[in-house]
């Protein structure tokens, strides 16, 4: 379940830390589920409801999804929906919500995540080669845009193991984990670190780490 929470947060972070207006379906930050319904447009409130009390779960296991778009898959859905281990508890739901909130605060903390024009995005945003499947490395040049930093570096690591990312830095540059994540309630992301001797960033498994360069 912890891995599912981290992967949900990682998926949402790709949207929240990307350029442009971020659209997130209500409840995604709370692990909202429609019980494997592949097309819930006409499924009614039972499958589309948004549960605010974590004690009621997230909607997973509400029943077999309606037949028109799902019956062919019931043989697979039935054992999954009946498995209590796949239904997140309050610990999982609250962890996902808190990680989502942290990414919102990171987005708000710097103009780097809302540059405003295609020309600025093309000029400032780059994707250094990560050389590892499941990893995206993004650098945003914030010179003249953010008075606090000269760049923001984001590493999305979807793998089940830590990732070590080499980075090129000008002489005297300083790298630090974003203040929001340095004070995070998530102990895993706080393990993200910069090694000045090797010039590398280390990011734990299933983690999005945001670093500031000054």
Image (spheres, grey):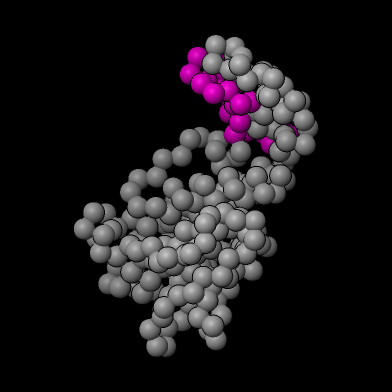
Task: Specify the quadrant of the image occupied by residue 102.
Answer: bottom right
Q: Is residue 86 above or below residue 194?
A: above
Name which residue lies at 51% across and 35% down. Answer: 26
Q: Quadrant of the N terminus?
A: top right
- Determine the residue located farthest toward the left in the rendered image: 119
Name which residue lies at 49% across and 51% down. Answer: 13
Task: Specify the quadrant of the image occupied by residue 75.
Answer: top right
> Is residue 48 found inside the magenta-colored segment of the image?
yes
Dominant secondary structure of the magenta stretch? loop
Name which residue lies at 54% across and 51% down. Answer: 10
Q: Quadrant of the C terminus?
A: bottom left
Does residue 64 appear in this view?
yes
Name which residue lies at 38% across and 71% down. Answer: 151
> Is residue 118 found inside the magenta-colored segment of the image?
no
Please provide percent x and percent y for residue 179.
Answer: 53, 68
- Which region of the structure is painted magenta? 32-56
Please provide percent x and percent y for residue 163.
Answer: 58, 66
Q: Is residue 113 above or below residue 20?
A: below
- Determine the residue located farthest toward the right in the rendered image: 84
Please provide percent x and percent y for residue 17.
Answer: 43, 54
């Amino acid at each position: 379940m912890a891995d599912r929470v981290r992967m949900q947060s990682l998926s949402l972070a790709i949207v929240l830390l990307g350029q442009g207006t971020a659209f997130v379906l209500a409840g995604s930050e709370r692990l909202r589920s429609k019980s494997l319904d592949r097309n819930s447009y006409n499924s009614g409130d039972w499958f589309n409801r948004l549960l605010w009390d974590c004690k009621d779960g997230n909607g997973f296991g509400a029943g077999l999804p309606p037949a028109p778009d799902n019956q062919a898959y019931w043989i697979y859905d039935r054992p999954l929906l009946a498995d209590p281990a796949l239904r997140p508890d309050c610990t999982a739901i609250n962890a996902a919500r808190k990680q989502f909130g942290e990414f919102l605060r990171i987005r708000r903390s710097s103009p780097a995540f809302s540059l405003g024009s295609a020309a600025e995005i093309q000029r400032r945003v780059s994707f250094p080669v990560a050389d590892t499947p499941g990893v995206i490395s993004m650098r945003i040049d914030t010179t003249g845009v953010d008075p606090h930093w000269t760049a923001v570096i984001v590493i999305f690591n979807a793998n089940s193991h830590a990732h070590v990312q080499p980075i090129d830095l000008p002489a005297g540059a300083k790298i630090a984990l974003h203040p929001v994540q340095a004070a995070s309630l998530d102990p895993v992301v706080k393990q993200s670190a910069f090694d000045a001797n090797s010039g590398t960033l280390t990011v734990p498994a299933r983690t999005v780490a945001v670093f500031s360069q000054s």
